[in-house]
Amino acid sequence: MISLEAVTKIYHQPLLSLIFEAQSVHRHHHQTDAVQMCTLSNIKSGRCPEDCKYCPQSARYPTEVESYPLLPLEEVISQAQDAKEHGATRFCMGAAWRNAPDGEDFERVLQMVEAVAGMGMEACVTMGMLRPDQAQRLAKAGLTAYNHNLDTSEKFYPEIITTRTYRDRLETIQHVANAGIQVCCGGIVGMGETDSDRLELLHTLANLSPQPESVPINALSPVQGTPLGDVEPIDPLVLVRMVATARILMPKAIVRLSAGRDRLSVSDQALCFLAGANSIFSSEKLLTTANPDWQDDAKMFHQLGIKPKEFA
């Protein structure tokens, strides 16, 4: 068990000392000049009944996000093939549901997972709460990882979401782990939380059993129409601290520099890689928000001397 005091001590070190410690841990466990490229596909968009204040896909907010039902299997396979050709080794599929459905939609998601895994790519899905039997079926289909973020601290959580509890999220994470699927679980900074909330989020993540194999660190991408649409962007150095502390606390995890990357300079991103981030999402959009495209990332990798992580 890692104490909150230990997390606090790590996080509040002088920034250069924190980055040095994180880079030392990173070098011990990971290839230092390789970053995994992932692509996230929005396989079902909008009309979600939840009230997550950051999310333009909630049916409760007047955003201009396009709504559509689950995409045809062939379209998702085509997107995955395109992602693979651009160097992505992980293909993530996001569906705006409160909980994973039953029936035809779930069967089609299983087919998507089988197809992506069959290409030799890592397959990841995020589609809300899962039951144990659904997690088992996803595992059987070849799912690598299931994404289910905690978003923030348990204390601040009700300020952001009221339609499901923190406990609900932790239960789904446990069902995923019990099915032998990798847990992809992280959070979002810049929603009005305090440093204390960020520390508690990291503390909770580090004490999950097993620890998540994948930890996405997102910066809020404010979208007009959502309750957080006018929030000022977070200081990039907060992201650097989050990445570095996550790296030290969860040495074997892939720490993913996720949403909000379009607002970061190459220098900001370089600091995040130095602090232990070793994955990015590279595609024109992250579900519904802006993201650097393949060409931007290829140029950045060239500038920094980073190469895309190859297929395992």
Image: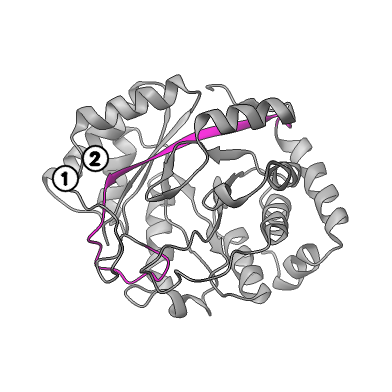
- How crowded is the residue under tag 1: few (<14 C-alpha within 10 Å), some, or many (20+)? some
- How crowded is the residue under tag 2: few (<14 C-alpha within 10 Å), some, or many (20+)? many
- Residue 23 in sight from this viewpoint: yes
Q: Is residue 51 on the magenta stretch?
A: yes
Q: Tell me the number on the disc at residue 83.
A: none
User: Residue visible at 32% across and 57% down?
Assistant: 128
Please tell me in which quadrant of the rendered image residue 269 appears: top right
Magenta residue span = 31-55
What residue is pinned by disc 2?
109
Q: Nearer the viewer, residue 267 or 82?
A: 267
Query: Do callouts 1 and 2 mark residues in contact (Cβ within 8 Å)?
Result: yes
Task: Please identify the residue farthest to the left as the structure is shown.
Answer: 104
Residue 95 picture location, percent across and down: 29, 50
Residue 118 picture location, percent across and down: 34, 22
Residue 33 picture location, percent across and down: 72, 29
User: Residue visible at 34% across and 72% down?
Assistant: 164
User: Residue visible at 49% across and 44% down?
Assistant: 291
User: Residue visible at 38% across and 63% down?
Assistant: 55
What residue is pinned by disc 1?
105
Amino acid under label 1? Asp
On screen, residue 225 versus residue 156, left or right, reads: left
* SS state under label 2: helix
Amino acid under label 2? Val
